[in-house]
Image (tube, helix red, strand yellow):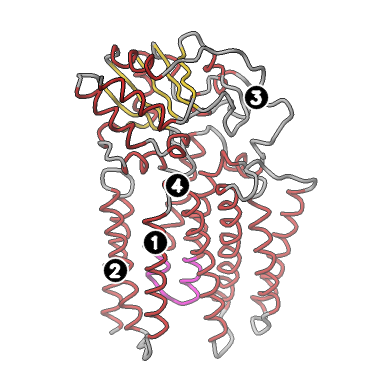
Amino acid sequence: MVTLTNIVYLIASVLFILGLKNLSSPKTARRGNLLSMSGMFLAVVITLFDKQILDFTYIIAGVIIGAAIGAVAAKRVEMTAMPQMVALFNGFGGGASTLVALSEFTQLTGDPVLNVSITLVLSVLIGTVTFTGSLIAFAKLQGVMRSAPIVYKLQHVVNALLLIAVIVLGVIFALNPTVISPLLVILAIAALLGVLAVIPIGGADMPVVISLLNSYSGLAAAATGFVLSNNVLIISGSLVGASGIILTNIMCKAMNRSLANVLFAAVGQEVAGAGGERRDVTRYQAEDASVMLENAQSVIIVPGYGLAVAQAQHILSEMANILTERGKKVRYAIHPVAGRMPGHMNVLLAEANVSYEQLFDMDEINDDFQNTDVALVIGANDVINPAARYKKDSSLYGMPILNVDKSSTVMIIKRSLSPGFAGEDNELFYDSKTMMCFGDAKKMVTEIVKFLKE
């Protein structure tokens, strides 16, 4: 049975790796999910048989309840709430790792060896930080608490002292694992650390936080795998941890900021007078926008979080199809940090059956704006703000942006002139070649489609 278990674990691990590879592209992401799910199914089934469990009552009940919750979440959660759901799932993964590790510790008949004691501490620490940190990320994204950074004096010093306390208590526990009280104190401190680590991070940086917490959940699972001596848990946890760190690094590069700056700089604080001087703009109607699009030969669409809020992806796809049928060249420019989580815009547009061939990353399409008739921006702000290029006192400074201002005409559909998460007013709104179409994105695009069809 041991040999069979290891063979199945190997197959599951290969499926995890292939699944992760396929998740790197929107075109193959669905296949990647199926491969990864298949690998996890095999791993769970062989583990249950390997442990020779006699009564599956609670396991079956857990599977039914969990599957029901997952099915309801998949069907009912709006696309705008997807980042919150991902944050919660990250937290549940970390919390599960902590509970499993603690449960295994209570089942040990003798003193755990040193490496098990160390990984037990790491599992409890990382898993609990992931759990409470993810709850805060969920609260910020859901609007339960304000998205602006929450800061106080000596914040970093307090966090450092708490971390030092965890290290000291971890050493004490590792040297004498028969006493559980240090581990319980670590659990409490880790719960507090998770909260304190995320509250100073602004809403604009939540995509980075989500990918980082995803990495933490994988590391917690890997540590729990060492506690259980379970190879497939170690492998899958390590894959999630590594991929999460890589994604976090990609997101930081997209903003031209270091991870330390994201975590500790409290970018996005509410500042009196933020947003700069407001000037008058020329308002355009849906009919004006339809005429401009009708006369254009090339259009690049820039989606942002406002598109998700308005749930305008389906009508936008219909509009793009109309323009394409009339011989226009229509493409979508995707900024890496557009939306509230990595890949948010890709998932949103895939839901509306937008062809993957029309989706282009920032680096692939940025040079094409200068040869484009119309850049249509829907619900995006910071990722198109020219202040990122030259305004050194701006939190956006140095962040690569989409070069929509290089196109012949910029058409922006937005509810108001309010700044983005960074709190920086966007000078592009006031440019003479910018058409500001104020209103709900879904209603505005619907009206544009109506005029295009006439």
Q: CA distance from mark 2 to mark 1?
A: 32 Å
Closer to the chain start, of discs 2 and 3, is 2
Q: Which residues are magenta?
A: 221-235
Closer to the chain start, of discs 4 and 1, is 1
Decide which of 346, 196 is in the foreground and name it: 346
Decide which of 268, 361 is in the foreground and name it: 268
Looking at numbered disc 1 in the image, what kind of residue is underneath it? Answer: Val
The residue indicated by pointer 1 is 72
Closer to the chain start, of discs 4 and 3, is 4
Looking at numbered disc 2 in the image, what kind of residue is underneath it? Answer: Leu
Looking at numbered disc 3 in the image, what kind of residue is underneath it? Answer: Gly
- SS at circle 3: loop
Q: CA distance from mark 2 to mark 4?
A: 24 Å
Q: CA distance from mark 4 to mark 1?
A: 31 Å
Q: Quadrant of the N terminus?
A: bottom left
Crowding at dot 3, Cα within 10 Å, few <14 / some 14-19 / many 20+, comes out as some
Expressed as whole percent of the image width and height from the top left, the position of residue 193 reads 67, 58
Closer to the chain start, of discs 2 and 1, is 2
Nearer the observer, disc 4 or disc 1? 1
Q: Is residue 7 above or below residue 70?
A: below
Give the residue drawn at x 41%, y 39%. Answer: 311
Residue 403's tag is none
Expressed as whole percent of the image width and height from the top left, the position of residue 136 reads 61, 54
Give the residue drawn at x 59%, y 86%. Answer: 111
Residue 275's tag is 3
The residue indicated by pointer 4 is 246
Q: Is residue 425 above or below residue 216?
A: above
